[in-house]
Image (tube, grey):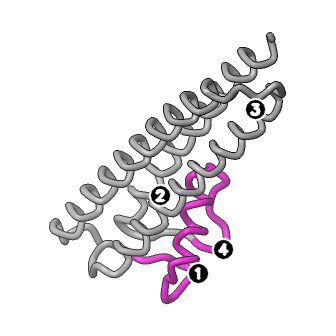
Amino acid sequence: MYGDWAANAAVVLATMAAVGACVLVHYEGLAWMSRRLLRRHDANPRRKVVLGVLGVLSLHVAELWLFGATFWGLDRIPGTGHVVGADPLGLLDAVYLATMSYTTVGFGDVSPVGALRLLAGTSALTGFVMLTWSASFLFLEMERFWRR
């Protein structure tokens, strides 16, 4: 099953690229939001918190699409595995699979087989870290804005 080392290497490299892209998107997105939220002179600090929540959700959706596109692309490479429950794997199916992995909900009607499982497991770990990072960011922003 894992005898195709070139396909396995493709999965490892694509997984590393997806994780790196997600961390970069998240870091830059949070930094941008922090600067934007601090610069705004709204009288209503709750509006800033709502904008922060919407911004964080937007970052997560972008990251889901990054992982989904990675699943979708790797599924087209022979030897990397396949996805049970979605044959052929469409882009929206791949984003759905990424969402189930990233949010650590788990697999149900679609699940990866073969080397693609590395991407799924890493997506879950990355999602857990990104979600907790977002929660920490929002907590700090809420604490700062609601103290006023």
Which circle's residue, 4 or 1, is located before the other in the chain? Answer: 1
**Residue, far left:** 6
Which circle's residue, 2 or 4, is located before the other in the chain? Answer: 4
Mark 1 crowdedness (10 Å alpha carbons): few <14, some 14-19, many ≥20: few
In the rendered image, the quadrant that contains the N terminus is bottom left
**What's the CA distance linking mark 4 and mark 1?**
6 Å
The residue pinned by badge 3 equals 49
Residue at the spot x=30%, y=50% of the render? 16
Residue 31, placed above or below residue 71: above
Q: Which mark is residue 135?
A: none
Mark 2 crowdedness (10 Å alpha carbons): few <14, some 14-19, many ≥20: many
Which circle's residue, 1 or 3, is located before the other in the chain? Answer: 3
* Circles 2 and 1 in contact, beta carbons < 8 Å: no
Which circle's residue, 2 or 1, is located before the other in the chain? Answer: 1
Residue 23 is situated, as x and y percent measured from the top left of the image, at 42, 41
**What's the CA distance linking mark 1 and mark 3?**
39 Å
**What's the CA distance linking mark 2 and mark 4?**
14 Å
Residue 106 falls in which quadrant of the image? Answer: bottom right
Name which residue type carries label 3.
Val
Helix, strand or loop at mark 2: helix
| 133 relative to 17 in the view: left or right | right
The residue pinned by badge 2 equals 120
| Residue 12 vs residue 4, the one in the foreground | 12
How many numbered circles does the render carry?
Answer: 4
Residue 133, placed above or below residue 148: below
Q: Which residues are magenta?
A: 81-110
